[in-house]
Image: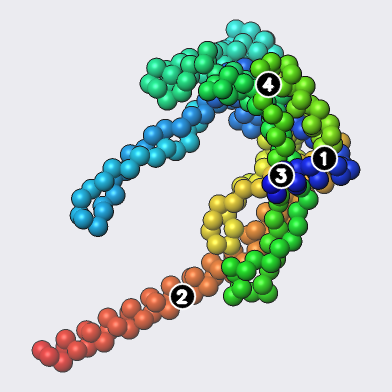
C-alpha cells in the first residue's frame, strides 16, 4: 500500500465534520457545456491549439504546439424577447441560449476541437467519470484536508520568515464499474464515509432574485443580482484595479446594511494612501519642472555669452 492509499484509508477511518459535496442543479447533460451562475450564461469550454516558433541553438526555427483554455459565453439576456411576460421571456431565452451553446459545440466537433457527444458520457454525481478507452465508469472522490502550517524553506530571506499554509487533497479511488448506477452508488457510499453531504444547488431565474439598493449609494460598490453579493471595483493606492465581493448571510435589512458597510470599509482601506501618493507625485513633477526651467535659463545664458 502506497503513501497515498494509506492517507486515504486513514481519512476513511477518522471521524469527519460536516462538509458539503455540491454541484449545480442546472446541468446541460452535455460535456463541455455548463451553466455559469455569475454571468447567467451557458458556457462552452474547450482547448485551443496554439502554435509558436522558438529559436534553437542551431539558429533554426522550431515550431512548438501547445493549447490554451478558451470559453465561449451565451448570456441569457442576449436572447430575451419582449412579446412575453418577464418569467416566460427568461425561460425561453434560457432554452435559446442553451441551444446556441449546443450548436456552437457541434461546430467545434466538426473542427476537431471536441469529441462527439455520442463518444462521451457523463454522470450527475461528482467523482464519477466515463473512461472511453476502457468502457468503464471510474470513481474518484476528492476531499480537502485541514490546512497545516509548514515553513517555506525556499523563502528564508523573506521578512519574518512567514509560514505558508498547505492544503492536502485526499483522493479515494473507488474502482471501475461497467454499470453507471453501481459507480454512482459507490461514489455516494464513499462520500458518506468521508462525511460529505451531497447538496444540489438550485438555480433560480434572474428575475426571481432580489435586487438590493443601498440607503446611501457608494461609487464602486454595487449589488450583483446574479451572485447575490456586493461587488466592489476600485483602484488601490498603487493604481491597480481590484475587485472584491461581500456575501450577506441573509436578506434581512440589518444584514444587508452590515455587509454593505463592510464592502465600503474594504474600498476605503484599499484607497488609503492614494491621495498622499498623488500629492507626492505632483511635488516631484513640480521639482522636475523647476529644474527644467533652470536648465533652460543656463543654456540661454551660455548662448548669449558666445554671441
| Callout 3: SS | loop
Query: Which label number is shown at residue 105?
Result: none
- Residue 48 seen by the camera: yes
Image height of 66 relative to 90, above or below: below
What separation in Å lies between label 4 and label 2 (alpha carbons)? 71 Å
Q: Are marks 2 and 1 in contact (CB under 8 Å)?
A: no
**Mark 1 = which residue?**
12
Name the residue rendered at 22%, 84% in the picture: 300
User: Nearer the observer, disc 4 or disc 3?
Assistant: 3
- In primary-sequence order, the first of circles 4 and 2 is 4
The answer to which of marks 4 and 3 sits earlier in the sequence is: 3
Q: Quadrant of the C terminus?
A: bottom left
Circles 1 and 3 in contact, beta carbons < 8 Å = no
- Residue topped by disc 4: 177
Q: Which residue is mark 2?
A: 284
**Residue 176 drawn at (x, y percent):** 67, 25
Q: Point out the residue furthest to the left here.
A: 307
Q: Earlier in the sequence, mark 2 or mark 1?
A: 1
Q: Which mark is residue 1?
A: 3
Comparing marks 1 and 3, which lies closer to the viewer? Answer: 3
The residues bearing labels 2 and 1 have C-alpha atoms spaced at a distance of: 63 Å
Q: Residue drawn 77% across and 33% down?
A: 21
Q: Nearer the viewer, mark 4 or mark 2?
A: 4
Q: Crowding near pointer 4: few (<14 within 10 Å), some, many (20+)?
A: some
Farthest residue to the bottom: give it: 305
Which quadrant would residue 90 be assigned to in this image?
top right
User: Which residue does the image show at 16% across and 92% down from the upper left?
Assistant: 305
Q: Secondary structure at mark 2?
A: helix
Q: Nearer the viewer, mark 2 or mark 3?
A: 3
State the quadrant of the N terminus. Answer: top right
- Pointer 1 or 4: first along the chain: 1
Amino acid at each position: 500500500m502506497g503513501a497515498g492509499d494509506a492517507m486515504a484509508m486513514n481519512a476513511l477511518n477518522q471521524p469527519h465534520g460536516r462538509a458539503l459535496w455540491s454541484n449545480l442543479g442546472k446541468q446541460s447533460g452535455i460535456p463541455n457545456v455548463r451553466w455559469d451562475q455569475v454571468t447567467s450564461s451557458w458556457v462552452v469550454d474547450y482547448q485551443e491549439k496554439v502554435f509558436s516558433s522558438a529559436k534553437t541553438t542551431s539558429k533554426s526555427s522550431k515550431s512548438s504546439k501547445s493549447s490554451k483554455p478558451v470559453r465561449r459565453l451565451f448570456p441569457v439576456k442576449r436572447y430575451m424577447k419582449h412579446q412575453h411576460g418577464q418569467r416566460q421571456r427568461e425561460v425561453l431565452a434560457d432554452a435559446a441560449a442553451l441551444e446556441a451553446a449546443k450548436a456552437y459545440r457541434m461546430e467545434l466537433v466538426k473542427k476537431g476541437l471536441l469529441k462527439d457527444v455520442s463518444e462521451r458520457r457523463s454522470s450527475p454525481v461528482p467523482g464519477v467519470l466515463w473512461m472511453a478507452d476502457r468502457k468503464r465508469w471510474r470513481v474518484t472522490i476528492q476531499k480537502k484536508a485541514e490546512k497545516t502550517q509548514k515553513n517555506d524553506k525556499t523563502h528564508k530571506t523573506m521578512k519574518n520568515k512567514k509560514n505558508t499554509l498547505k492544503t492536502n487533497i485526499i483522493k479515494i479511488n473507488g474502482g471501475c464499474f461497467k454499470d453507471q448506477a453501481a459507480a454512482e452508488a459507490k461514489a455516494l457510499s464513499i462520500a458518506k464515509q468521508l462525511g460529505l453531504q451531497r447538496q444540489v444547488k438550485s438555480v433560480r431565474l434572474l428575475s426571481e432574485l432580489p435586487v438590493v439598493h443601498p440607503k446611501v449609494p457608494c461609487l464602486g460598490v454595487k449589488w450583483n443580482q446574479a451572485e447575490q453579493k456586493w461587488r466592489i471595483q476600485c483602484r488601490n493606492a498603487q493604481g491597480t484595479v481590484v475587485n472584491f465581493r461581500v456575501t450577506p448571510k441573509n436578506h434581512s435589512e440589518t444584514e444587508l446594511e452590515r455587509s454593505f458597510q463592510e464592502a465600503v470599509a474594504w474600498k476605503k482601506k484599499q484607497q488609503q494612501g492614494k491621495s498622499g501618493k498623488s500629492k507626492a507625485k505632483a511635488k516631484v513633477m513640480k521639482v522636475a519642472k523647476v529644474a527644467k526651467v533652470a536648465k533652460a535659463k543656463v543654456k540661454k545664458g551660455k548662448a548669449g555669452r558666445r554671441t
